[in-house]
Amino acid sequence: MHRLSIVLVGCSVLAGCGDAGNSDPFGTASSTLGTTSPTTTAPPTSETTIEPGTSSSTAGTSQSSTVADTSTSTGVVDGSTTGNDPIFDVGAGTTGEAEPCVKVDVILAVDASSSMDGVIQDLQASFNGWVGSLLADVGEGGIMDFQLAVIDGCDMSPFFHDTHDDNGACNFSTGGNYMVSSSPALGAEFACVSDTQVSNYSVGDICTGDEDDESPAAAAAAAVTFPAEMNENAGFLRPDAVLFVIAVTNEDEGGSPSFINPQALHDALLAAKGNEVNNVVFLGIAGSELCFAYGAFTTPAPQMEALAGLFAADNRGVFYDLCTQNVGPAFDMAIQLVDSACDNFVPEG
């Protein structure tokens, strides 16, 4: 049985995103783009229409995703899903198994600006599909469990959300500010925080207006770095789990135009997992060009693409074009890499 850790982050194009002048623990306010490594573009496949809430093993012909070279020995699988299987019936697992990876830790950080309305709705509709794929398609017979945290794109207060602005505390079964796949109320818990426009950590964060939400990858990195990792987010990051980070934005990491250091963010996320390249998977969902998607403008995201490219050079990264207006295939592609990471996981300690 395998275990993993997953992080999902996002940001917006036109409204409510972060300011380039924000506090910058990972050097993201740098004019250095960072050194990118060669990446592989997914080959065209026959076009597949994917309804919200389902998943597919194909990426379709209309998107250009930066993915790891699947010809390597990392064991990338075909990404097929079992959409009719029970999604939340995780089971107790088996002790004493030889496989080192039996858990997944997932962080979802999504831009909370108003232009992200349609994107957030698509992410919510896709939830059952990628959760089912995660449980069924990762590891031999599925992973034992995963944890899931939701955060916005504010790296000034990088704390996982646990409160709905209108309905109050989400009361996760973990007793913390993150969810676990074995919770009988996982769907309701996710619904409580998945719209980051109306969810937050406890009584709120310090980011408002133009300071908010344009640094999803940086927020994810800060969330699993001291001091947040040991304080507000304590208990989430597990030494025996793969970390899966998903960053979603309809602008670019850091805003547009953005001046960040993708290499610094890459290194910060790796440092959270003992600097083991096999223990972190990164999915960046953003625009590859200027387009009108989900009812708002999406701008090119070269910084997010560069960051995903650094992970792709490790065979652990995907960049997916938000202009496709269909996020489902992005999760299919990333979960293949999560499975590969599980096969090659290096336990910490």
Image (cartoon, rainbow, N blue to C red):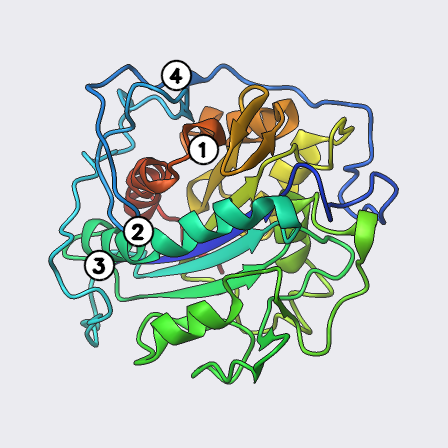
Q: Are marks 4 and 2 in contact (CB under 8 Å)?
A: no
Mark in the foreground, 1 or 3: 1
Disc 1: which residue: 317
Q: Which residue is mark 3?
A: 98
Of residues 330 and 73, the one drawn nearer to the viewer in this rendering: 330
Q: Amino acid at mark 4?
A: Thr
**From the viewer's perspective, is the residue at label 1 or at label 2 nearer?**
2
Above/below status of 176 relative to 284: below
Instruction: Classify mark 4: residues with Cα within 10 Å, few (<14), some (14-19) or many (20+).
Output: some
Real-space Cα separation, disc 4 to disc 3, in angstroms: 34 Å
Residue drawn at 54 percent across, 42 percent down: 248
The residue identified by callout 2 is 130
Which amino acid type is shown beneath numbered disc 1?
Gly
The quadrant the N terminus occupies is bottom left
Image depth: mark 4 or mark 1 in front: 4
SS at badge 2? helix
